Image: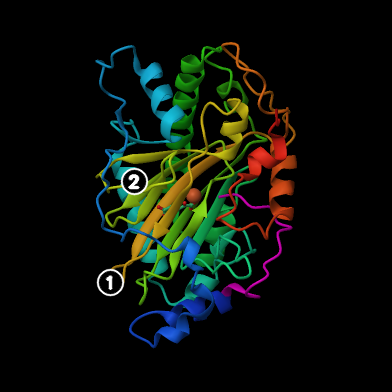
């Protein structure tokens, strides 16, 4: 989710331009309007948005007590294989998820000029989240990024969108979502540390009550697309976070890549939360938990909404990869800030490049 502020926006100059492109290319208009959204053949989806996976994707019931070998071992095994899991009975109140979804739908269906009030910088507020790489295609998505740490911009968003009346109930929902998700992520990080055989606070001590974290939420809204076979909502990528937790509202479209390179659609589950291992955790776990490559496939009828919460450690924290169980060191110590700088300098990297940026940055080649 997070990108550095310095990252150049080399495809369209303003958020307004993106919005008008989406509007122009949307609906039943001629397909040549798709222009810069068309992705090269090597990146085109092989399965439609509503395909079912031929392999069961991992689901973890956090409320169940009958995991053979224990919950930590189960979660660890799944994350080692997939870097991804759908969690049910996660403890995040469903009314918060519903309120977030209701807000998301009402926000993105506002007229463009109204949404643009909430566009306060390239990487914050309303706009395009992802950078276009020349020759790769612009993702077909509108976004809204709200940060809570190191500095919250929720109050600024509220003041810009509702300057007179405010929006106290939205403010409360966003704050509740943020703290419930932070708690959930800490639980997961403790279980993963336990499963790796290090102190259960190995990762989480750097997340609890740390004001220097990079933490925030992001909404994605994918309007229907006239030609979903040539355009993507999110190009194949890994998240630069430690963990990302995403809610896929009603309409499917998310696909995750297995280790053998095959794509697997993630079915919508009411109240399921999707957990992604991000680049930082891949390095921090010495490669035991791979950052999952994922993409979003569009449909031509129904808008799709998703929202996520992502947390990364303080920018200056020196991340010492966990060398456990006799594993040789596969990653060097690195910082989140250094990694993000590297990733932003790499903005021309294509999604079909085989090496993951975290490997190129901190991986040790033997
Ligand atoms: O919308 C989705 O399901 C995934 C979005 C995503 O991968 C992201 O925002 O990083
Ligand atoms: Fe992602």
Q: Tag count in the figure? A: 2
**Start-end of magenta stretch:** 1-15
Please say if 224 is above or below 51: below
Q: Position of residue 274 (x, y in %)?
A: 38, 41
Viewed as shown, does residue 270 lie left or right of 343? left
How would you rate the neighbour count of disc 2 (Cα within 10 Å): few for under 14, some for 14-19, many for 20 or more? Answer: many
Type of secondary structure dominating the magenta stretch: loop
Q: Quadrant of residue 361?
A: top right
Which residue lies under the disc numbered 2? 97
For the C terminus, the image quarter is: top right
Q: Position of residue 37 (x, y in %)?
A: 50, 73
Asked if residue 39 shows in the view, the reply is yes
Viewed as shown, does residue 361 lie left or right of 100? right
Whole-number angstrom distance, CA of label 2 to CA of label 1: 24 Å
Label 2 vs label 1, nearer the camera: 1
Which residue lies under the disc numbered 1? 301
Label 2 secondary element = helix
Please say if 311 is above or below 111: above
Depth check: give the residue in front, 104 or 143: 143
**Residue located 61% across and 63% down the image:** 131
Q: Position of residue 157 (x, y in %)?
A: 55, 59
């Amino acid at each position: 989710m997070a990108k550095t502020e310095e990252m150049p926006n080399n495809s369209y100059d303003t958020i307004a331009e993106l919005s008008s492109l989406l509007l122009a290319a949307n609906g039943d208009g001629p397909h040549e309007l798709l222009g810069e959204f068309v992705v090269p053949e090597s990146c085109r989806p092989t399965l439609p948005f509503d395909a079912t996976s031929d392999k069961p994707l991992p689901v973890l019931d956090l409320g169940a007590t009958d995991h053979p070998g224990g919950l930590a071992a189960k979660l660890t095994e799944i994350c080692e294989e997939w870097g991804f899991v759908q969690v049910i009975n996660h403890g995040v109140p469903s009314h918060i998820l519903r309120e977030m979804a209701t807000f998301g739908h009402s926000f993105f269906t506002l007229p463009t000029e109204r949404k643009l009030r909430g566009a306060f910088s390239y990487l914050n507020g309303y706009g395009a989240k992802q950078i276009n790489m020349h020759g790769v295609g612009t993702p077909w998505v509108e976004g809204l990024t709200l940060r809570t740490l190191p500095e919250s911009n929720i109050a600024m968003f509220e003041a810009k969108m509702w300057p007179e009346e405010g929006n106290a109930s939205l403010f409360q929902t966003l704050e509740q979502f943020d703290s419930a998700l932070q708690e959930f992520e800490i639980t997961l990080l403790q279980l993963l540390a336990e499963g790796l055989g290090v102190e259960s606070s190995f990762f989480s001590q750097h997340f609890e009550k740390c004001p220097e974290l990079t933490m925030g939420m992001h909404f994605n809204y994918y309007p229907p697309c006239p030609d979903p076979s040539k355009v993507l909502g999110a190009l194949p990528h890994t998240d630069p976070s430690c963990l990302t937790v995403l809610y896929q509202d009603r309409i499917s479209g998310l696909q995750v890549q297995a280790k053998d390179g095959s794509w697997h659609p993630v079915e919508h589950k009411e109240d399921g939360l999707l957990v992604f291992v991000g680049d930082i955790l891949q390095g921090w776990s010495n490669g035991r938990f791979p950052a999952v490559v994922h993409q979003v496939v569009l449909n031509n009828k129904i808008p799709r909404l998703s929202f996520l919460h992502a947390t990364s450690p303080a920018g200056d924290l020196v991340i010492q990869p966990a060398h456990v169980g006799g594993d040789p060191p596969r990653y060097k110590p690195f910082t989140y800030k250094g990694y993000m700088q590297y990733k932003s300098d790499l903005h021309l990297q294509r999604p079909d490049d085989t090496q993951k940026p975290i490997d190129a940055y901190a991986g040790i080649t033997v």
